[in-house]
Amino acid sequence: MKEEVGMKRRGPTLALVALAATGIVALTPAMSVAAENLWENLAGLTGGTITNDDTDTQVTLGVVEAGPYVNPLGVGQVLYGTYYDVREFEGDAQFANIQILNTNTNNQGLPLCTDPDYVSGNDGSTCYNPDGGILAKVRFRDAKNSIELLDFNIALSCGEVWAGQILLNEVVGVPQIRSIYPIVTNVTPNTITTQDILTTAKDFTQPGGVAVDDMVRGYFEIIAMEALPCEPQDGEVTLTGDLWDRGVPAVTDTTPSNALAGETFLVRVAAGVSHNYNMTAISRFVRQLGGSITPAVITGSEAPNITNCRAVDILGAPLSAQQCVSQVNMALSKNRLMGQYDVDALTLGSTHLVVNLPTKRITCGPGNFDVPPFQCETNPLNNDPPTNGEEITCTVYDRLEHFVTEDDPIFSPAPPNTRCFLPYELSIIEIVDGPANVHSSRADFALSSQTLAAGESGWVDLDLAHTPGNPPSLVHKEVFPAPWTTHNIQGIFIGGYTGLPAIGLVLQEFQNNNPAVAGTYGNTVPMISETSYIIPGLQS
């Protein structure tokens, strides 16, 4: 759809925010309160926008810009695809389909977005944003150490979906990706060119020191880098590719929209199983009017990553690279992850827990240990069960509240049966009603419910903050330096958090051996989670 002649882009000289404003604005009959998208707006929960209908002037309530945080509704500027896997499983080939959506509308029949729409986080939904196109980085990482395996860039028009399939190159044994949709092939200061070069599958690159077995499973991230026009130059997206205009920063706001959303399907054709999950989204990674974060070298580098946020502290000063990492870690932090299991032999039930630590590599850096909140340990010997990694507390319960304990517990309640580690940055745990050293090829290790009275079903508690003991030891935490003016959740400043930045999935399967309706059935749900934050001024 062609952008209409004369449409004006939102410029950086517009006075969107009065960060230095103090006090409370009294509402009068001449003021109407704007509806806010609390996960994409300027101020989060600390204020809102009001319009004086007599003077048509805009007033922002509150003095704090909300920082990057996970949007539970699944839309933002950064997406994490928790898990891909192209290994053969039980004799069945496996592949992953990924779908990346730009949720900005391309309906030009809607009113043109104005300043209040951007401040309230409603741009691109109830109004038309002519700069609603998005230039985004797509990056795949290996399971063990988050080593980059492949990256490329995509240009998404308003309302467009980019889709691709990750599969195994059976000749050389590495993953590859193919897509009928174009990717970016050339970037100049004024234009972006896309072409359909992934119609021929592209192999992932095997870095030095990375085993093929660590490449065939992993995770991926998508980062919005820059705003583009809602449509390419000719006004219509094509499957063969397009030419896009780029904005001039002095004239145009190049800040990418909070408009990315994504889904992943893990498919085994022969078994007829599809595991589906929504990608985890972080909104406000780039603040309003923060501009482009497109690097000078757009492919083949670690840029941009979570060090490149554009957020500010309470005084409006930019967050440093390390503060960006801490803000994202807090946003993803979990004190506990919990998931239910069903491994009943009658239905050949199987349960796998997938735990992704997508920020560990960047947080720890090379050769470092004990960088909060991580211990920064790895599992170089691939021990099963693991004896290194991030130590946590793992407790297996049945449905009748019994949990696995030591054989002769001295204390009540008893500590868990064994020490428990997340060995990799993507760890897969199977729950088994038998010996823990017998598990599927999908899993890195197993937790056993064999000693429980009703161990064929129940739930698992992964305490990501503490290691076992009486009392448990609080190991995983990050405390921000006083005066606690740098990190916030929805505009409310936070002193730190406990736990680990983690994303968890439960993969559950059953088999029906009735010859008339034989089949395998699969389902995927996010792991239940709890968070724990350190609130300045409160003591416990």
Image (tube, rainbow, N blue to C red):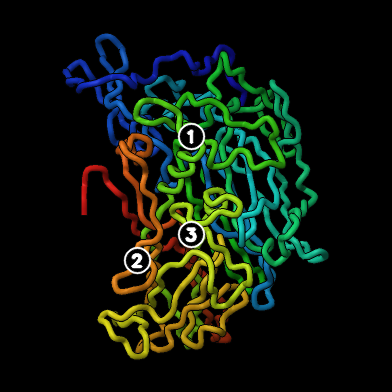
Q: What kind of element bears circle 1? A: loop
467 left or right of 411? Answer: right
Tell me if residue 271 can be seen. Answer: yes
Q: Which residue is mark 3?
A: 375
Instruction: Give the farthest residue toward the top.
Output: 55
Kind of residue at badge 3: Gln
Q: Please give the label number shown on residue 473.
A: 2
Q: What kind of element bears circle 2? A: strand
Tell me if residue 263 can be seen. Answer: no
Against 354, is 312 above or below?
above
Residue 465: percent from the left, percent from the top?
38, 61
Q: Which residue is mark 1?
A: 320
Q: Quadrant of the N terminus?
A: top right
Instruction: Determine the CA span between mark 1 and mark 3.
Output: 22 Å
Front in this rendered view, residue 24 or 118: 24
Residue 201: percent from the left, percent from the top?
77, 52
Against 332, is 514 above or below?
below
Kind of residue at badge 1: Ser
Q: What kind of element bears circle 3? A: loop
Q: Residue at x 32, y 29 (%)?
A: 64
Disc 2 to disc 3: CB gap under 8 Å? no
Instruction: Determine the CA span between mark 1 and mark 2.
Output: 31 Å
Front in this rendered view, residue 157 or 377: 377
Kind of residue at badge 2: Ser
Front in this rendered view, residue 448 or 528: 448
Q: Residue at x 21, y 54 (%)?
A: 540
| Residue 2, quarter of picture | top right
